[in-house]
C-alpha cells in the first residue's frame, strides 16, 4: 500500500473534518523544523472515533518525521499503528485536556532510553490530534549552548502548536529548498537583537563580511551595514525584513556571498516573544545556477547565429541559382538551397530549447513543410510513429537524410502515378528504424546505387554510414518503393 493510501485508511477511522485534515497537512509539511529543533522523532496521533462527540476508542498514527539533527529512535515505520484508549496515558490525557505533558520519566524502547512528551494540536477551539515526541534520553545529557537554545525554541514552537498558532497561516517554509535548522540558526529577542547564533549561521554571516560580535547586535542592522558596503542600493530594508515581526523569506546578496534567510516569529499567548532566523549559505548553489543558466543561454545563442548564417548562405545560393542560365546548374543550386535550409531548421529548433537535444518530430514537421512547398506534387507524407528526442549530433545528418528521401519520393516516385508517401519510425532500446515509402513508379530498371552519380542519394549514404553509423537500402516491396535506414542510438 502506498503511503497516501495508508494515511487515507488511517483517516477513515477518525471523525476529523476536511478542515481539520487540511490543518494537519499544513502541520506535517512544516514540522521538520520542530523535529530538528528538538532532536526528536515526532509522531502525529489522531483520535480513533466514530463521530466528534463520541469517546475515542484510541489513537492512530498518521505521520512520522525523523530529525535531521540527531539519529532517529525508530528504525521501523510507525504510520498506521493503533493504540487503544488506556495504552498510552500521556497521549490520552493530552487529547482530553489539551495540555502539553513534559518531564515524564524516560522509558526503555528496545535498548534505548527514550523520553516521550506529548503536545496537543489545537485548531478552531478543539484538540484535533496529539504529537508524541521521542528522543534519546542519554544523548540529551551533554547539552551544548546550541542544544539548549534549540530545545528552548522547540518548546516555544510546541506551545504555538498547542495554542494553534503554528504553522503560521500562508506559511512559506514549505517552499522548495527552504533553509533548515542545520543550515544555520539565529535566535532573536522580541526587539530583534541576537541572543544566540549557531556556528553555521556565524560562518555564513562572517562570509558576508561581518567580523564583530553577534550577541546583542540587531540582526537587521548587521545586514543593513553589510549591504551598505555595496554600490547598488537595495530595495529591501533589512531592518524590517529581519525584525522578526512577520514570516519572511529573502535572499541576501552583497557580492561577498549569498544567504537564503527565513524569518519565523515566535508567539506566546498572542504576544510576540522573539523569532528565529534560519540562515542558509547558498553562495555556491546560486553561482552554479547562474553559471548553468548563462552556459545554456550561450549555447542557444550560438545555435541561433548558426541558423542565421545558414539562412544567409541559403539566400545567396538562391540568388545565384536564379542568375545562372544553365538549367542543370540552376537546379543544382536550388537543391543546395533546400539542403542548407534543412540544416538551418535543426539549429533553429536547438536555439529554442535549452538542451543539446531536440524533439526531432518538430524538426521533421518543418522539413516536410519545406519539402512540400518546393515540390511539384504537394502531397503530405503520412507519419507513423514518433522520432522522439535526439541528440543534436544525430539530428543534423538525419534531417538531411530524411529531406532527401522525401524529396525523391515526391520528385521521382510520384512523378507519374502514385499518391502516397509514408514515413515509418520505430525506436527500440538500441536501434532506430526509419522507412520512407511511396507507392509510385519505382526505381529505374538500370538503377545502381553505387554507380549513381547523382548527389542526393550520395549524401544520404555518406551521412547514414559515416555520421549515423547505420545502413541504408532501397528496394521495391509489393507496389511500394522503400528506403530503409537503420542506425544505433
Ligand atoms: N523514391 C524513388 N522512386 C523512384 N526513383 C527514385 C526514388 N528515389 C530515387 N530514385 C532514383 O534514383 C536517382 C538518384 O536519386 P538522387 O541521388 O536523389 O538524385 P536526384 O534526385 O538528383 O536525381 C533518381 O534520379 C531516381 O531515378
Ligand atoms: Mg534526389
Image (tube, rainbow, N blue to C red):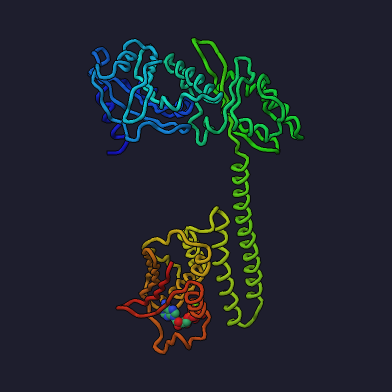
Provide residue 321's location: percent of width, then percent of height: 63, 75
Tell me: residue 332, above or below residue 142: below
Tell me: residue 296, above or below residue 287: below
> How many numbered marks does the figure carry?
0
Determine the image quadrant of residue 107: top left
Provide residue 91's location: percent of width, then percent of height: 32, 18
Provide residue 207's location: percent of width, then percent of height: 67, 36
> Who's the residue at 37% across and 70% down the image?
420
Give left or right: position of 38 versus 344.
left
- Of the 4 image quadrants, the one containing the C terminus is bottom left
Give left or right: position of 56 versus 383.
left
> Who's the residue at 60% across and 38% down the image?
282
Provide residue 105's location: percent of width, then percent of height: 36, 17
Can residue 484 be seen here? The reply is yes
Tell me: residue 390, above or below residue 297: below
- Of the 4 image quadrants, the one containing the N terminus is top left
> Who's the residue at 60% across and 59% down the image?
303
Can residue 131 be seen here? The reply is no
Q: Nearer the viewer, residue 165 or 449?
A: 165
Q: Nearer the viewer, residue 54 or 191?
A: 191
Amino acid at each position: 500500500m502506498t503511503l497516501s493510501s495508508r494515511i487515507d485508511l488511517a483517516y477513515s477511522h477518525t471523525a476529523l473534518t476536511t478542515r481539520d485534515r487540511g490543518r494537519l497537512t499544513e502541520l506535517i509539511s512544516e514540522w521538520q523544523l520542530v523535529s530538528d529543533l528538538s532532536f526528536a522523532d515526532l509522531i502525529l496521533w489522531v483520535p480513533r472515533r466514530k463521530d466528534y462527540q463520541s469517546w475515542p476508542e484510541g489513537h492512530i498514527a498518521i505521520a512520522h518525521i525523523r530529525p535531521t539533527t540527531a539519529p532517529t529512535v525508530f528504525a521501523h515505520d510507525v504510520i498506521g499503528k493503533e493504540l487503544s484508549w488506556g495504552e498510552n496515558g500521556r497521549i490520552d490525557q493530552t487529547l482530553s485536556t489539551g495540555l502539553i505533558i513534559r518531564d515524564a520519566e524516560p522509558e526503555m524502547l528496545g535498548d534505548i532510553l527514550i523520553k516521550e512528551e506529548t503536545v496537543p494540536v489545537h485548531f478552531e477551539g478543539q484538540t484535533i490530534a496529539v504529537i508524541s515526541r521521542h528522543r534519546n534520553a542519554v544523548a540529551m545529557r551533554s547539552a551544548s549552548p546550541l542544544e539548549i537554545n534549540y530545545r528552548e525554541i522547540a518548546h516555544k514552537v510546541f506551545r504555538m502548536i498547542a495554542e494553534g498558532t503554528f504553522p503560521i497561516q500562508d506559511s512559506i517554509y514549505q517552499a522548495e529548498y527552504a533553509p533548515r535548522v542545520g543550515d544555520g540558526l539565529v535566535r532573536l529577542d522580541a526587539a530583534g537583537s541576537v541572543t544566540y547564533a549557531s556556528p553555521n549561521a556565524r560562518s555564513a554571516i562572517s562570509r558576508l563580511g561581518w567580523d564583530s560580535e553577534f550577541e546583542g547586535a540587531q540582526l537587521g542592522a548587521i545586514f543593513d551595514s553589510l549591504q551598505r558596503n555595496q554600490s547598488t542600493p537595495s530595495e529591501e530594508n533589512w531592518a524590517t525584513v529581519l525584525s522578526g515581526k512577520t514570516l519572511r523569506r529573502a535572499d541576501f546578496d552583497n557580492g561577498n556571498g549569498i544567504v537564503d534567510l527565513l524569518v519565523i516569529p515566535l508567539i506566546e499567548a498572542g504576544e510576540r516573544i522573539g523569532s528565529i532566523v534560519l540562515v542558509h549559505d547558498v553562495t555556491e548553489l546560486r553561482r552554479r545556477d547562474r553559471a548553468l543558466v548563462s552556459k545554456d543561454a550561450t549555447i542557444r545563442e550560438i545555435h541561433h547565429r548558426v541558423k542565421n548564417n545558414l539562412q544567409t548562405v541559403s539566400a545567396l545560393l538562391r540568388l545565384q541559382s536564379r542568375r545562372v542560365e544553365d538549367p542543370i546548374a540552376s537546379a543544382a543550386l536550388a537543391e543546395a538551397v533546400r539542403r542548407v535550409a534543412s540544416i538551418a531548421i535543426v539549429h533553429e529548433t536547438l536555439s529554442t530549447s535549452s538542451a543539446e537535444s531536440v524533439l526531432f518530430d518538430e524538426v521533421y514537421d518543418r522539413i516536410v513543410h519545406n519539402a512540400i512547398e518546393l515540390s511539384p506534387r504537394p502531397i503530405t507524407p503520412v507519419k507513423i510513429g514518433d522520432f522522439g528526442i535526439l541528440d543534436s549530433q544525430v539530428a543534423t545528418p538525419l534531417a538531411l537524410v530524411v529531406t532527401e528521401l522525401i524529396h525523391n519520393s515526391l520528385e521521382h516516385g510520384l512523378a507519374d502515378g502514385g499518391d502516397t508517401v509514408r514515413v515509418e519510425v520505430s525506436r527500440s532500446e538500441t536501434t532506430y528504424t526509419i522507412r520512407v515509402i511511396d507507392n509510385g513508379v519505382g526505381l529505374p530498371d538500370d538503377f545502381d546505387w553505387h554507380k549513381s552519380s547523382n548527389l542526393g542519394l550520395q549524401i544520404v549514404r555518406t551521412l547514414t554510414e559515416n555520421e549515423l553509423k547505420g545502413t541504408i537500402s532501397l528496394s521495391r516491396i509489393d507496389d511500394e518503393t522503400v528506403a530503409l535506414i537503420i542506425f544505433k542510438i
